[in-house]
């Protein structure tokens, strides 16, 4: 049964936005939501400011109690109130990135996501002279791009252990104090707000926080809990790495793409190096190396590397060149399986060409493939972005060291005709089919 357009959009949204958020928020992967236990420490954080009315009052209370906190600021508000940023830093507090617009990144593409992070960092660094180290996305929402971009920018994601619900309409100083003191434990990261001008925030909410804050600070002290700077608790506490987080999320994304595009395993029920899909050619007549021509409407076999299988084979601590050699070896070992599939199964009798798109095309000519440049355009850009990210994700040096190969990592088509495949890889004792070619 074919999926409807709405179902396709839902699956893509699930893979791009919902799955990353669920994995990080509830699976506690790739982010810090509590400090290490053992020293009776808690961390106090404030979101959504700075606000020219509420933030100075909070700073005064913290100063009276000699307590340090971390303020996760919204970029637009920070740019409008640079002096408040300086006051926060001068008082010895920390500042983190809370997004530039305080909008959910679920609905941001990669470019908007990068701007949201970069503009806030730039604003903080411009007015304080300090490099941003921590971030907390608005509403604790993530997308597939943001979880890796935080790592690329060297930012540690800090969430919270529980909510005080201080931003809701029904919040009172008593309810906020009760919720915090009831649930605060060794290692808790507390979340409060110093601004009421973001979407969903109750008008006057920070006033309730200001009234509750002295009681909260005194209550924590009575329970033997020390409020300490975020920096004191965050060293060595990164949970599972962003790479591991992204790999898990990417697995969901990869599954969704395969379902949507009809890509399936070469051998059902068995992990193999290849996955494939049947496609109809839509372009202009394409002259093949053996003189045959692939025409519009004719069928070809689109090959895809099974990334899970490949990464299990090569491991993580390999160079790009070594990964390419291992890939070629695996390609060679399974091409006979492809030849037998096309030879025996009538469903594939009309296939004329094998086609793949890859960055690791060096040496494929020795296997019988011919490499063709991809024309400049959106498809080449998208494929290049996708495959470079996969390599960067599993490359031991990460995305930064992968930059040394940037000029070499250009996606190309590699093709082999059915006739060449059969001549090279079909076992001699296999009876010939009546397929094309």
Image (spheres, rainbow, N blue to C red):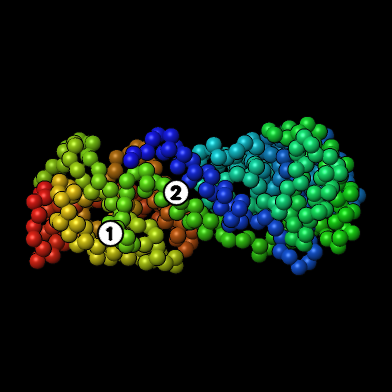
| Secondary structure type for disc 2 | helix
Q: Which mark is residue 253?
A: 2
User: Who comes first in sequence, dot 1 or dot 2?
Assistant: 2
Left or right side of 112 for 274: left
The picture places residue 59, in percent across and down from the top left corner, at: 84, 45
Query: How far apart are the two marked residues, 1 and 2, measured between alpha carbons?
Result: 22 Å
The picture places residue 213, in percent across and down from the top left corner, at: 86, 46
| Residue 186 shows in this picture | yes
Crowding at dot 2, Cα within 10 Å, few <14 / some 14-19 / many 20+, comes out as: many
Q: Is residue 216 above or below residue 233?
A: above
Within the image, what quadrant is residue 232 found in? bottom right
Q: Residue at x 67, y 51 (%)?
A: 159
Q: Residue at x 19, y 43 (%)?
A: 299
Find disc 1 in the rendering and name its residue. 267
Within the image, what quadrant is residue 328 found in? bottom left
The picture places residue 415, in percent across and down from the top left corner, at: 22, 50
């Amino acid at each position: 049964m074919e999926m409807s357009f709405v179902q396709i959009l839902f699956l893509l949204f699930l893979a791009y936005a919902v799955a990353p958020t669920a994995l990080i928020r509830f699976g506690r992967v790739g982010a810090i939501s509590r400090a290490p236990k053992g020293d009776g420490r808690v961390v106090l954080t404030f979101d959504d400011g700075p606000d020219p009315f509420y933030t100075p009052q909070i700073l005064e209370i913290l100063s009276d109690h000699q307590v340090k906190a971390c303020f996760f600021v919204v970029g637009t508000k920070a740019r409008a109130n640079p002096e408040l940023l300086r006051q926060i830093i001068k008082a010895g507090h920390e500042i983190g990135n809370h997004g530039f617009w305080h909008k959910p990144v679920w609905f941001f593409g990669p470019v908007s996501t990068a701007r949201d992070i970069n503009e806030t960092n730039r604003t903080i660094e411009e007015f304080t002279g300090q490099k941003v180290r921590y971030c907390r996305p608005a509403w604790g929402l993530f997308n597939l791009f943001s979880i890796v971009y935080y790592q690329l920018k060297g930012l540690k994601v800090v969430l919270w252990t529980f909510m005080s619900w201080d931003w809701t309409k029904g919040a009172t100083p008593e309810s906020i104090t009760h919720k915090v003191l009831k649930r605060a434990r060794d290692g808790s990261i507390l979340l409060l707000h110093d601004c009421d001008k973001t979407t969903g925030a109750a008008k006057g909410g920070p006033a309730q926080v200001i009234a509750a804050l002295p009681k909260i600070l005194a209550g924590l002290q009575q329970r033997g809990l020390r409020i300490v700077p975020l920096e004191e608790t965050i060293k060595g506490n990164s949970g599972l790495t962003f790479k591991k987080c992204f790999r898990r999320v990417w697995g969901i994304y990869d599954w969704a793409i395969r379902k949507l595009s009809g890509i399936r395993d070469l051998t059902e029920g068995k992990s193999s190096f290849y996955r494939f899909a049947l496609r109809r050619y839509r372009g202009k007549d394409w002259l093949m190396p053996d003189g045959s021509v692939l025409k519009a409407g004719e069928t070809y076999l689109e090959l895809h590397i099974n990334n899970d299988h490949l990464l299990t084979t090569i491991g993580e601590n390999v160079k790009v060149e070594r990964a390419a050699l291992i890939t070629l070896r695996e390609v060679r070992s399974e091409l006979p399986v492809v030849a037998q599939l096309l030879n025996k199964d009538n469903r594939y009798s009309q296939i004329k060409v094998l086609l793949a798109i890859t960055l690791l095309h060096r040496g494929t000519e020795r296997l019988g493939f011919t490499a063709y440049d991809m024309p400049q355009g959106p498809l080449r850009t998208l494929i290049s972005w996708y495959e470079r990210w996969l390599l960067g994700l599993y490359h031991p040096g990460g995305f930064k060291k992968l930059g040394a190969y940037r000029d070499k990592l250009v996606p190309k088509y590699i093709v082999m005709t059915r006739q060449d495949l059969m001549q090279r890889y079909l076992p001699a004792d296999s009876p010939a089919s009546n397929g094309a070619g």
